[in-house]
Amino acid sequence: MTIVPLVRAEFARLTASRLGIASLIALMTVPIIYGGLYLWGNKDPYGSLSKVPAAIVVADTGSTLDGSPVNYGRDAADSLVSGKRFGWHVVSAQTARAGVTSGRYDFVVTFPAGFSSALTSAGGSTPQTARLELTTNDINSYLSTTLAKQATETIRTTIAQEVAKSASGTLLDAVSSLRSGLVDAQHGSSELASGAATASRGATALASGSASLASGAASLSAGLSTLSSSSAALPASTASLASGASRLSGGLRSLSTAVSGSSPTSLSSATAATAAGAAQLRQQLAAALAASDVPPQTQAQLNAAMGQLAGATAATASGVSGTLAPSIARLSSGSATLASGAATLAARSPQLVAGISTAAAGAERLSSGAASAASGASTLSNGVARIATGSGTLRDSLSSGVARVPATTAAERARTAAILSDPILVKQHAITTAQNYGAGLAPFFISLSAWIGIYALFLLVRPLSRRALTAVARPIRTTLAGWATPALLGVVQMIGLYAVLTLALGLHVANPLGLLAFMALVSVTFAAIVLALNALLGSVGQFLGLVLMIVQLVTAGGTFPWQTLPGPLAVLHQALPMSHAVDGVRQLMYGGAAGDLIAAILPLLGWLVVGLGLTALAARRQGRRRSLTQLRPSAIGG
């Protein structure tokens, strides 16, 4: 026969009956069921993390920052709750501890007391590292712990960024304040330099003025000396002038005696000549006095004397001869003396003028030097005052700048830099912990392996013995006999699996004997369930065992937290036995509480009793029939 007829014959056999067609269709849907359910359950687990319960404990007492109260712990908790990334619950520390232990909460994030104080210290001279506490329990879910670590790291990073932003602002404010102090110091130093320059100019001007003052004083002294010397000769000249006038008077007396013996014509001519000479002498004296710097009082005395002389001459010319002779005698003698005194006075007058001019120039230079010295002294005083002000500003600014910059050691600076770069430290406390990723997924695969092992056994093991159904009167005995064989073989499977886990893979088990016993319980329970399906439904029941395994593979919560499952699958998680098997293995493998272990054992015992009970009902029903139809081959397998 060729290939095509053989294939046609096989299809004909599979579709020979309605039951065969139904069985074929059911088997064809296995990939659809498995792929559909698995992808449905894991379509978007991260988007469903808001269903994962987590607790927040806020023990932070707050702090102050720039005079304003802050509470980073409370603010972070409010942000987490409003963000709905997880199913956050703000509770007390005691409630959170009990909840994460019992599985009510998958993990707990705690903001301890002093959290805000440590964060606000980042802007000070003695920064401290803030601590963020994370409490996990791998019994709840290994991936829940991983997700909790990621969530806590996100919290830490977010708060650290805020703290770094605040610390940067504080640092920039300090730098700005320091710059302000440096600007003040710069202004002070500029004022100091300007004051010093002003003081230098004032000192130069003062020195120049002092030199001018000294020079002017010397000139004044010399001029005054000259004036004194010239003034000393002036009285002598005046005395000589008076003496000349006296001799003029005597001469005129002699003239008078001589004239008394002369003729009138000679007397008249002589008198006229004398009067003309006296007038000419008066004019010359007036001109000489006008051209000189003789004091006005002295000029007045000389002019008065000359006036008397002129008057006397005139009187002599017009007088009688009895008075003419004495007048002419005095006039002759006085005019000679007067001429001599006037000559002496004229000779001394230039020296007097030069001395007075020198004294005036010296006095002017002295006044100018004194004014320059006074101006220089004032400038110097202003410069010194500005130097004092600038020095004070510079001192205060530098002192303020030094006060703003704390004195730190290299170790302190290194510690501060480390804290500012990572101001928050996550402190994790694990109530229970898996050894590694393999240990984290082991509970799920142990439970799945137990189901697959039992399912495979029933491909060979007959659910209920037909001979027993006919010979044994009590269905319970037939049930126990049909259950005992796969149950014992399942226990052997679990012993072998346990050996591989602990010896070959080296996984740590907190309660070895307890885990081995629980694995045996899981296996015998699964045996009772698959036995019941086969006893009640035959080949259909065997197929349903495969479907049930696929459903539990998705709903057991062995990878992602079961809370991320869609609603119908989450309900199945609570009801199906593999979910409790996974929880129980976690408790014993990681070291959970006895109460939580009992919570996993009781549902399994219930499934065990139900499975055996349903099998007993099937045995009773089949025992009553006792017909040859029970010997008919299965719809699948021929």
Image (cartoon, rainbow, N blue to C red):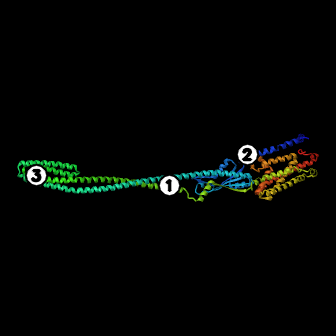
User: Which of 260 and 532 lies nearest the eye of the viewer?
Assistant: 260
Q: Position of residue 494 (x, y in %)?
A: 83, 55
Q: Quadrant of the N terminus?
A: top right
Label 2 belongs to which residue? Answer: 44
Q: Residue at x 36, y 54 (%)?
A: 209
User: Which of 549 and 31 lies nearest the eye of the viewer?
Assistant: 31
Distance between the alpha carbons at the discs numbered 2 and 3:
159 Å
Using the rendered image of the protein, determine whether residue 436 is visible from the camera's viewpoint.
Answer: yes
Amino acid beneath label 1:
Ser
Within 10 Å of disc 1 (Cα), the crowding (few <14, some 14-19, many 20+) is many
Label 3 belongs to which residue? Answer: 328
Q: Position of residue 633 (x, y in %)?
A: 91, 45
Distance between the alpha carbons at the discs numbered 2 and 1:
63 Å
Using the rendered image of the protein, determine whether residue 318 is visible from the camera's viewpoint.
Answer: no
The correct choice, above or below, for 230 with respect to 632 in the image is below
Label 1 belongs to which residue? Answer: 397
Q: Residue at x 33, y 55 (%)?
A: 213
Q: Nearer the viewer, mark 2 or mark 3?
A: 3
Which numbered disc covers residue 32?
none
Dot 3: element: helix
Q: Total number of numbered labels?
A: 3
Residue 235 relative to residue 43: left or right: left
Amino acid beneath label 2:
Asp
Q: Earlier in the sequence, mark 3 or mark 1?
A: 3
Amino acid beneath label 3:
Ile
Distance between the alpha carbons at the discs numbered 3 and 1:
100 Å
Dot 1: element: helix
Q: Nearer the viewer, mark 3 or mark 1?
A: 3
Q: Earlier in the sequence, mark 2 or mark 1?
A: 2
Residue 236 relative to residue 406: left or right: left
Dot 2: element: loop
Q: Earlier in the sequence, mark 2 or mark 3?
A: 2
